[in-house]
Image (cartoon, helix red, strand yellow):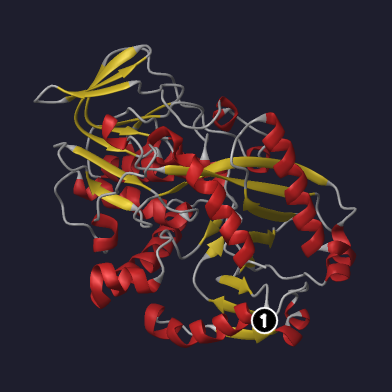
Amino acid sequence: MKRIYEAAAYAPDPGVFWHDTCPRPDWPRLERDLRCEVAVIGGGFTGLNAALHLAQDGIDVALFEAETPDFGASTRNGGFCCLGGAKAPDALLRRRFGAAGLADWRATEKAAVAHVTGLLRDHAIEADTHSQGETLLAHAPRAMADLRARAAGIDTAYGVTPELTEGRDLPARGLGGAFHGALTIPLGFALNPAKYHAGLSRAADTAGAALHARTPVTALRHNGQAYRLQTPRGTVTADRVILATNGYSSEDVPAWLRARTLPVQSSVLVTRPLTRTEQEAQGWTSDQMAYDTRTLLHYFRKMPDGRFLFGMRGGLTATPRAQAAITRKIRRDFHAMFPAWRGVEITHDWSGLLCLMANLTPFAGPVPGHPGLFAGLGYHGNGVAMGSYTGALLAALVQGKPPTGPWPAALQDPPKRFPFGRFRRALLAPAYAAAALFDR
């Protein structure tokens, strides 16, 4: 497999807290040749949603995960099921797709959150959900001015009434820290992504999907009639294929993927459970999932058991030296933002890859020039909701059925290639440096 990061970025089980909270799914390795109607490459939220909905429709579907069932971004994230998925600002979306296209994208963001809500309900998945929407915290006075301006358009964009909290009122809301105010949008919630993934796995298996782990697809070819997927211990023949590998994609499976994604690292730490006294000492007693307004944002939340999760963008490489540096930096940032917890034990920390696109929007649809091949990827760090929704969307498209929810032009726009090919990570250093200056 051709990937652009060092091997450590793809190492299994890097001390993720979520893996300690529930039994991990156990999918068999493919040990023989196989024929199916639809093959799904990738066992994360997108792939599992596609497999689940295809199996529910009576389609013979087989899914192939290169590593363990809950490997990769689906269990290395912070568990924020929220609006998002695109990095493009409203002005750019409006310029590219028009006012109607922007409205369609906003409707899709809401539909994605509602989709996960429905899955949790319909399949009785207990995923430790909490938080009434998401809270954006202003890191500077100018950022609070931007939040005030943004609040005026939330009702029109999403059909909900946001709540503005001035800086002086944050302590009363249990949002203590060096923030200058907040904007809460009452859409979305936090969850345990491993429990959500395990629940999806059970649902897909019950529906009849064939789920395979430790089965990397090393080659994908079309012979004019069907696709041939090469794996270490068997060849799969499928009429149609869904690519759902996101930031963990191989550059040559298929060659169309080359340079169309830019994986970037995100780092997370989790503390031991905080006592009520410790929470009050910092002034953070809220159950809201939150993030700050920096371009290189921090995201954080107090979990139901009292632990505190804190995340940020990670390093530019996955070398031991770079990982040690980002481990030090995330602790510095955490202690600077929540100084009362400087002595609190950090029990888990890890990094994972999210996926950026040159278009700044996700992609979900047929791959141009490749009949029967579909792809869903590029959620810009917000894949719990949008990645899940994309999987269900692809399940309809691969059958030639109209989607049951919106499929906006922003999702249909085929991804462009990044410049510099396999050296495209060089784009990150100047972008991060500029963002750090802007964030001051």
Residue bearing mark 1: 141
Kindly identify the residue that appears in the image at 18 percent across and 43 percent down: 368
Q: How crowded is mark 1: few (under 14 residues within 10 Å), some or many (20 or more)?
A: few
Question: Where 375 sits versus 102, above or below?
Answer: above
Q: Nearer the viewer, residue 66 or 440?
A: 440
Q: Position of residue 185 (x, y in %)?
A: 53, 76
Question: Where 306 sits versus 23, above or below?
Answer: below
Instruction: Please tell me in which quadrant of the rendered image residue 50 appears.
Output: top left
Question: Would residue 406 be found to the left or right of residue 77 on screen?
Answer: left
Question: Would residue 405 be found to the left or right of residue 319 on screen?
Answer: left
Q: Where is residue 289 in the image (x, y as percent from the top left)?
A: 62, 65
- The N terminus - image quarter: top left
Q: Give the amino acid type for the residue marked by disc 1 in the picture.
A: Pro
Instruction: Please tell me in which quadrant of the rendered image residue 64 appears.
Output: top left
Question: Where 236 sits versus 182, above or below?
Answer: above
Q: Where is residue 405 in the image (x, y as percent from the top left)?
A: 27, 62
Instruction: Please tell me in which quadrant of the rendered image residue 168 appears.
Output: bottom right
Q: Which of 211 and 427 is in front in this view?
A: 427
Q: Nearer the viewer, residue 221 or 265?
A: 265
